[in-house]
Amino acid sequence: RDVLRRLAPDALVTADPTSPAAPAARACGIPVRVAGEIMSEREPAIQAKGASVALGDDTRFLIGFTSGTTSLPKAYRRTRATWRASLA
């Protein structure tokens, strides 16, 4: 919860909506989305915020976390450019 509060993402995307991160995100007021589901039109705030973001190579695309075995999990981020480079 502490990490989610500090990062304040627009949404949490997970493959497992029952994972421990899902209720923690909901408790922080962060919408939880299951990977592969289409976002509902009933969520205009998320859509509007996302639509206003430029989608250049330096745009943050993913924030992941380390396991946190030695302390709090550490966040790392990937941009669109890093994904394109690794997939090439």
Image: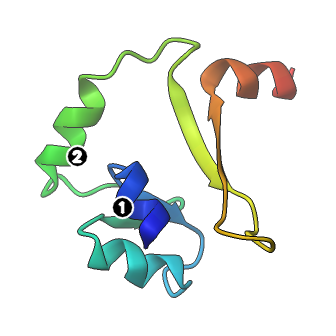
Counting labels gives 2
Q: Position of residue 33 (x, y in %)?
A: 41, 65
Which residue has dot 1 on it?
5
Counting other residues with Cα less than 10 Å from the Cα at mark 1, is it few (<14), some (14-19), or many (20 or more)? Answer: some
Pick whichever of labels 2 and 1 is earlier in the sequence: 1
Which of label 2 and label 1 is nearer to you?
A: 1
Counting other residues with Cα less than 10 Å from the Cα at mark 2, is it few (<14), some (14-19), or many (20 or more)? Answer: some
Given residues 79 and 66, the one toward you in this image is: 66
> Could you tell me which secondary element the residue under label 1 belongs to?
helix
Tell me what residue is drawn at x 44 percent, y 18 percent.
Answer: 55
Q: CA distance from mark 2 to mark 1?
A: 17 Å
Tell me what residue is drawn at x 30 percent, y 65 percent.
Answer: 31
Residue kind at label 2, given as amino acid type: Ile
Q: Where is the N terminus found, in terms of image quarters?
A: bottom left
In this view of the protein, can residue 43 be seen by the observer? yes
Residue 2 in the figure: left or right of residue 85: left
- Marks 2 and 1: CB-CB under 8 Å? no
Q: Position of residue 52 (x, y in %)?
A: 24, 22
The answer to which quarter of the image holds residue 12 is bottom left
Residue found at the very far front of the displayed protein = 71
Which residue has dot 2 on it?
46
Residue 1 in the figure: left or right of residue 43: right
Tell me what residue is drawn at x 85 percent, y 27 percent.
Answer: 86
> Could you tell me which secondary element the residue under label 2 belongs to?
helix
Q: Which mark is residue 17?
A: none
Above or below 85: residue 51: below
In this view of the protein, can residue 34 be seen by the observer? no
Q: Position of residue 27 (x, y in %)?
A: 29, 79
Above or below 47: residue 41: below
Residue kind at label 1, given as amino acid type: Arg
Given residues 23 and 47, the one toward you in this image is: 23
Tell me what residue is drawn at x 22 percent, y 35 percent.
Answer: 49
